[in-house]
Image (cartoon, coloured by chain):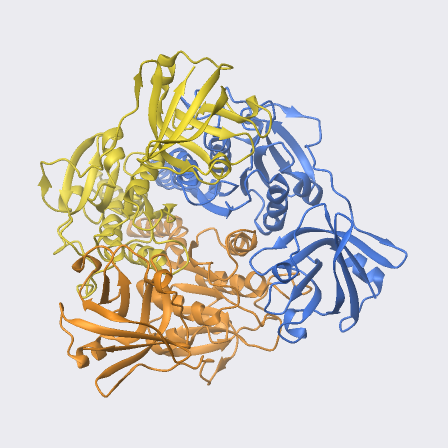
Chain colours: A orange, B blue, C yellow
């Protein structure tokens, strides 16, 4: 056998094999988030659109139980989970009360190489700050929209976002083909940062760890260190709603729930390394009727 | 090297490679729907049965939150989502209050090439009409039933439907091997069609867009056009429960929610291009205590 | 061409191909269970960690709606579904009220070849008994823990269990690399077995078939046979809560719900072949306010 023949064989072998390679190489995760709930066919319609475009996508759900129209919570949950996914992952987030209005539909690429396909209505508030913005492109719906969906004005999750996200994740289009790049910041919801004022840590209850009723605040680990709190210290916790004191009490600062007896309150750093308040095996929010959002403030002192 | 040797090599190469081809070629989506809820292990038992038959299936959920025993809503949700999936997709739908009784277990192939594995109890009402019936086969449980499951009479979702659906989707059996073909229509739930009567559109509230409290009716786009409604028109909406007027009021006809101020009512074409009623960023069903089903009628006039 | 050249070719061909083989051969299901609920980003953070380790994992959910802190129900649901998955499947179960305390983190290999990654807090009670213990290894967190997660004490689901489960399921580590093997039984929750006493079957309502309100007891098929109950027999059912009679009445023993009229009670063997009580197309638990757990006892006689 001559070298020429050998080369032919090599080419043949590689050709036959490379027909499989792209599927693996380009196969990326497509992660969905919405406020659609799981009771109807909306999420499945989005996944059907995506699967029709590529059978090789790895599809996952972040959550579909964002409270209806609650962009703040959508922004929070996206930030809670996205950084645990590898670069290249495409997130489709649809909390879209302004669907069909003039709000922009965008894909944001973060500095970490994650992609976020979403209405630009505040959903990107935290993730843009946390991961950094590499580039934002406005979705060109003349190219990136489900065929024959133009008469539907109320389900861009299916017709625009799932469609564009699936094409991007599967490699049918590159990021550059999403639409024009824009030199502007994404829309951000207003929010206050936590601060230390005359020895008192002052922050907001951003969100509830809903399943357990724990309170998750915007006070970070460094601020807790400024307070000089050490594991085992007793801290004074005050919670205000619209300026009225709703709860005041002592709680131990510990690493984890079991640092206190069952039924006792504890202050700890949660899985995002922010200050949180819980009852060991209880439900703090339910017991003391605490909610979350800008009107719910928390003060912590030694 | 002789040609004979070359051929041997070719055969070897192709053989080694084709061992992967079928998995890709036959890999099809298997989409589950049920009224099982997500609180226990029932859905996972079905998927375990399917995964045991083939590791190459792409499994998805339509919804498992169909209200218990509610065949109507199962039929509606199946129709809401199925057409967004590619031909060849196998749907397993199990809302099966008559499990273990004489109701037939079937696989319906639609004219669009989708497969529906289900008890024939009305679940196929809308999808049969929408996609058309190509052929119906009765599942032969002597062949298409999980081994050693004969003592269980109450979980055909696991023992018959998931098992048959997974075998069909993975290519272990062909459609012809499901069981005998039958020349009869599938069982259909009775339902009224919407109609125009003396200038008034009269229809039924088929289902709620539950997460947002929007009302989805059976009035289609063509009928709205017959009414001569144009975007921006004010329409009179009347809702009756068992013949009693429950709501009467004006609402703007628009393309999308944001066509009216927040908190105002709107009439629009939903994502299935049927007439729907909503409150922009509100919950119409909750505010006016509206339900869905045959006893809930709606009238629309200019 | 010489034999030597031929061998080289063979090696080349096999090498090129085997680059795909391991992914298939080792690709195993990773099935998650938790009490996290589906409302936030916790489940998605676990799956992101797993997907970052291997793109070839087939990930599924058993349920994430185990009531908060309820180890008993976690143990029950795991046992309800696991045996329907093939040998080699890795289950990650996280109902972990003692997270960060001294409770052990383990991987149990069953005699059937299934793996269970979990805090050893009682979660393995039923599955260990049902499938048998082949070997238990304590997770060595110096090796099997998400990088840079040491400051987080409250989310071992993400940092330890999903991480270890994904490495095991994808073949990055073998079972032997989880950590030291221990010769001790797993922690078991105390529970009473059902028994026949003077002609009366006495058992516990282990759990509710929550979606339908059916009562699932710990009385097995053999015990029902001891009672001599035949299909069609009328049985006397008595239900006690903390020793007080809450319900007493007759119910037919049948194979399936439709053996009685709609709205009537039935005693049957459920999909795990244990005695259960239901109302045909109704909700027994809701109608008679019945719960589940050790304090809820049931007595059955002819």
The quadrant holding residue C294 is top left
Give the image location of residue C142, x and y in percent: 12, 56
Give the image location of residue B123, x and y in percent: 62, 38
Q: Quadrant of the N terminus of chain B?
A: top left
In the rendered view, does C126 fall on the left or right side of B45? Answer: left
Give the image location of residue C252, x and y in percent: 51, 20
Give the image location of residue A262, x and y in percent: 22, 54
Q: Can residue B222 be seen in the rendering of this structure? A: yes
Q: Can residue B12 be seen in the rendering of this structure? A: no
The quadrant holding residue A240 is bottom left
Residue occupying the far bottom of the picture = A198
In this rendered view, identify the residue nearer to me: B287 or A190.
B287
In the rendered view, does C148 fall on the left or right side of A33? Answer: left
Q: Is residue B151 above or below residue C177?
A: above
In this rendered view, identify the residue nearer to me: C59 or C288.
C288
In this rendered view, identify the residue nearer to me: B138 or C201.
C201
Q: Is residue C277 above or below residue B77?
A: above
Q: Quadrant of the C terminus of chain B?
A: bottom right
In the rendered view, does B282 fall on the left or right side of C93? Answer: right
What residue lies at 23% left-to-right and 50% top-to-bottom? Answer: C167
Q: Is residue A237 above or below residue B103?
A: below
The quadrant holding residue A197 is bottom left
In the rendered view, does B97 fall on the left or right side of B22? Answer: right
What residue lies at 14% left-to-right and 68% top-to-bottom? Answer: A231
């Amino acid at each position: 056998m001559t070298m020429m023949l050998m080369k032919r064989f090599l080419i043949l072998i590689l050709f036959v094999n490379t027909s499989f390679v792209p599927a693996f190489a380009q196969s990326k995760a497509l992660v969905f988030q919405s406020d659609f709930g799981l009771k109807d066919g909306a999420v499945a319609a989005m996944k059907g659109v995506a699967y029709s475009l590529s059978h090789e996508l790895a599809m996952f759900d972040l959550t579909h139980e964002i409270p209806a129209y609650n962009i703040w919570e959508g922004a929070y949950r996206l930030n809670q989970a996205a950084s645990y996914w590898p670069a290249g992952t495409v997130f489709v987030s649809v909390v879209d009360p302004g669907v069909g209005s003039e709000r922009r539909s965008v894909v944001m690429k973060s500095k970490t190489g994650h992609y976020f396909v979403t209405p630009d209505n505040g959903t990107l508030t935290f993730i843009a700050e946390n991961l950094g913005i590499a580039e934002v492109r406005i979705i060109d719906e003349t190219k990136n929209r489900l065929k024959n969906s133009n008469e539907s004005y109320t389900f861009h999750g299916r017709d625009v976002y799932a469609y564009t996200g699936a094409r991007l994740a599967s490699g049918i289009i590159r990021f550059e083909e999403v639409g024009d790049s824009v030199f502007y910041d994404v829309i951000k919801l207003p929010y206050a940062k936590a601060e230390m004022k005359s020895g008192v840590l002052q922050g907001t209850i951003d969100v509830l760890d809903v399943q357990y009723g724990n309170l998750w605040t915007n006070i970070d680990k460094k601020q807790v260190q400024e307070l000089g709190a050490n594991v085992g210290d007793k801290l004074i916790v005050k919670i205000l709603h619209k300026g009225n004191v709703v709860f005041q009490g002592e709680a131990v600062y510990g690493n984890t729930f079991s640092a206190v007896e069952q039924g006792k309150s504890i202050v700890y750093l949660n899985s995002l390394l922010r200050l949180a308040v819980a009852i060991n095996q209880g439900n703090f929010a339910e017991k003391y009727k605490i909610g979350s959002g800008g009107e719910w403030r928390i003060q912590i002192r030694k």
